[in-house]
Image (spheres, grey):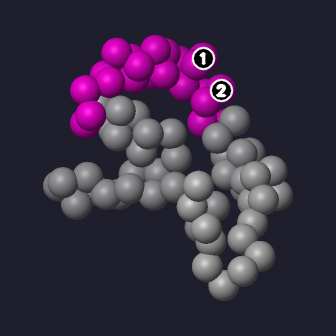
Amino acid sequence: MDEIHGRLPDGQWIIGVEVFRQLYAAVGLGLLVWPTRLPGVSHALNFGYQIFAKNRLRLTGRCTKETCEVG
């Protein structure tokens, strides 16, 4: 599983940037969502997120212990 997955209340699964769009809309940040749906912006975000998701552990580091510390 390279990308984030989410499940909507109706049971539908969503992946990638759409998960973040749904999360922002659900917490009242819908104003941040509409620009991400513009054709060029949407494509660029989806493409960029796929690259980031596949490389996130290399870019952000991984836990070296059995459990990760927060903070």
Query: Between marks 1 and 2, how big is the CA–CA gap?
Result: 6 Å
> Does residue 3 show up?
no
Residue 33's x, y, as percent?
39, 23
Left or right position of 43 against 31: right
Label 1: state its secondary structure: helix
Q: Residue furthest bottom?
A: 66
* Mark 2 crowdedness (10 Å alpha carbons): few <14, some 14-19, many ≥20: few
**Residue 46 figure quarter:** top right
Q: Nearer the viewer, residue 59 or 7?
A: 59
Q: Is residue 28 magenta?
A: yes
* Mark 1 crowdedness (10 Å alpha carbons): few <14, some 14-19, many ≥20: few
What secondary structure prevails in the magenta region?
helix
Q: Nearer the viewer, residue 3 or 40?
A: 3
Mark 1–mark 2 CB contact (< 8 Å)? yes
**Residue 25 figure quarter:** top left
Q: How many marks?
A: 2
Residue 65's x, y, as percent?
72, 80
- Residue 71 has which mark? none
Asked if 20 appears above or below 15 in the picture, the reply is above
Asked if 25 appears above or below 19 in the picture, the reply is above
Bounds of the magenta segment = 26-47
Q: Amino acid at mark 1?
A: Gly
- Residue 44 has which mark? 2
Q: Residue furthest front?
A: 71
Q: Is residue 21 magenta?
A: no
Residue 67's x, y, as percent?
61, 79
- The N terminus is located in which quarter? bottom right
Residue 6's x, y, as percent?
38, 56
Residue picked out by circle 1: 40
* Residue at the spot 75% in from the left edge and 66% down from the top edge: 62
Q: Nearer the viewer, residue 26 or 1?
A: 26
